[in-house]
Image (cartoon, rainbow, N blue to C red):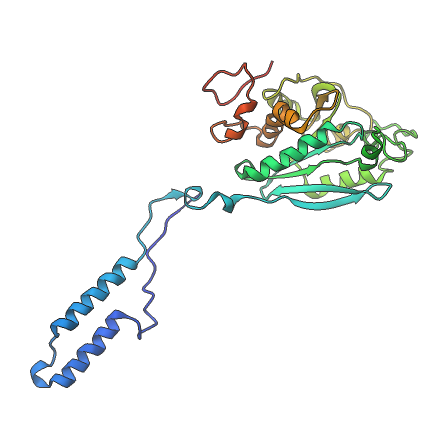
Amino acid sequence: MYFTIKHKKCLYSKRKDNCPFYLHDITRRKSEKEGGNGSAGKFNTPHLLIFFLISAIFIASCPKPANKLSLKENLPETCFKTEPRQYTIGVSNENRSIESFVIGEGYDVILIMASIHGDETAGTSLVLRLAEYLREHPITLEGRKVMIMPTVNPDGRERNSRYNSRGVDLNRNFSTGNRINTKENGLFPLSEPETRAIVRAIRQCKPNRIVAVHQPLACIDYDGPGRDLANHIAKYCDLPVRKLGAMPGSLGSYAGLMLDIPTVTLELPQGKSSSEYLWEQYGAALIAAILYPQPIDFSIHTALIPLKKQKACLGRCFFSCQ
C-alpha cells in the first residue's frame, strides 16, 4: 500500500484575523487613510518587509509533496502490532473454559489447535509460543487471521488422559460418515461439549486450513485436500509426510473429508520437551502453515533464522528437511 501527501488548502482561508494577506490589506488601507493623498496606494517599506517575511514563513510551513513510500516505511512498527483477542468458545464437562486466541484481521483464516487428547501436552506449549511470535512479528498476519485453541480437552489435560472426563475420545466424537457409536467414541455424534465447541469455532471462523497438533507418531498426516499443505509444512521440519488414513469420527474426517477444508495433523514425537526446544524444532513449520502457499522469507522473518537446519544452503530463503 502506498500513499502520497498532497498540499493542503490554506489554513487561513476562513480565519481572516490570522491570514497574512488579509493583515497586509488592513495595514495598507490604514496607511493610505493616515497618509492622505500623498501616500495613497503606496506600500511603506517596513510594511512590505513584514509582508514578505510573514509570507515566507507561511509558505515554508506548508507541507511538501511526499514521494510514494510504503506505509510501513512511514509509520512505526507498533502501529501494525496485533494483540491476541481471547475468547471462551465453550466449557468442558467439568466446567473448565475452552479458550481461543484470535490474532489478525485478514480474510485468510487459519485454525490451529492442540491437546484434543489431554495427555498430548507438547502441542499446547508450542501453539502458545506461536501466539507470542505472531504478536511480536505482525508482518506474518498481513491479510490473515489466526485462531489458536491451546487446549481443547482441559479435563483430559488435568488428568493427563487421552479422554475427557466422561471417558470419551474427543477425536472420535465428530459427526462424520465413518463414525462408530461406542461408549469410548460417544454414544452419538457431538455428544461432548468439547467437540461441540470445536464445531462451533469452525462454523464461526470458517478456516481456510486447519492444523491440529498431536503426539506421539512423529509425522505429518493430512485429510481432505491437505496434501499440498502437508508437503509445504514438511519443508520446515524433520517430520515426514505419512498418510495414516481418516479415523472414524475424527476432526480430519469431519473438517477434511466432509467440509473439504485442508486439514493437517502435526504429530510430534513422544516425550516432554521445553517450549523453547519445541519452538526451535517445529515453530517454522507452524509459520509455514500460516504463510502457505508462500515460502518463509527469512530476510523478513529474521527471528526464525536460528531455526534453519544445518542442511540449509547459505543464502537461500527456504530449506528442505528430508
Residue sitting nearer the eye, 278 or 282: 278
What residue is at 77 percent from the left and 36 percent from the top?
152
- Residue 277 visible: yes
Residue sitting nearer the eye, 108 or 57: 57
Instruction: Pinpoint residue 127: horizontal percent, then vertical percent.
Output: 67, 33
What residue is at 59 percent from the left and 44 percent from the top?
105
- Residue 260 visible: no
User: Which quarter of the figure has residue 72?
Assistant: top left
Instruction: Pinpoint residue 208: horizontal percent, then vertical percent.
Output: 64, 35
Q: Is residue 314 left or right of residue 289?
A: left
User: Which quarter of the figure has residue 273?
Assistant: top right
What residue is at 60 percent from the left and 45 percent from the top?
83
Q: Is residue 72 left or right of residue 255?
A: left
Q: Is residue 41 left or right of residue 149?
A: left
Total labels drawn = 0
Instruction: Pinpoint residue 316: horizontal percent, then vertical percent.
Output: 47, 20
- Where, quadrant-wise, is the C terminus in this rendering? top right
In this view, 166 is above or below 76: above
In this view, 45 is above or below 283: below
Query: Residue placed farthest to the left in the image?
Result: 38
Q: Is residue 26 left or right of residue 311?
A: left
- Where, quadrant-wise, is the N terminus in this rendering? top left
In this view, 168 is above or below 321: below
Instruction: Pinpoint residue 156: horizontal percent, then vertical percent.
Output: 83, 33
What residue is at 45 percent from the left and 20 percent from the top?
315
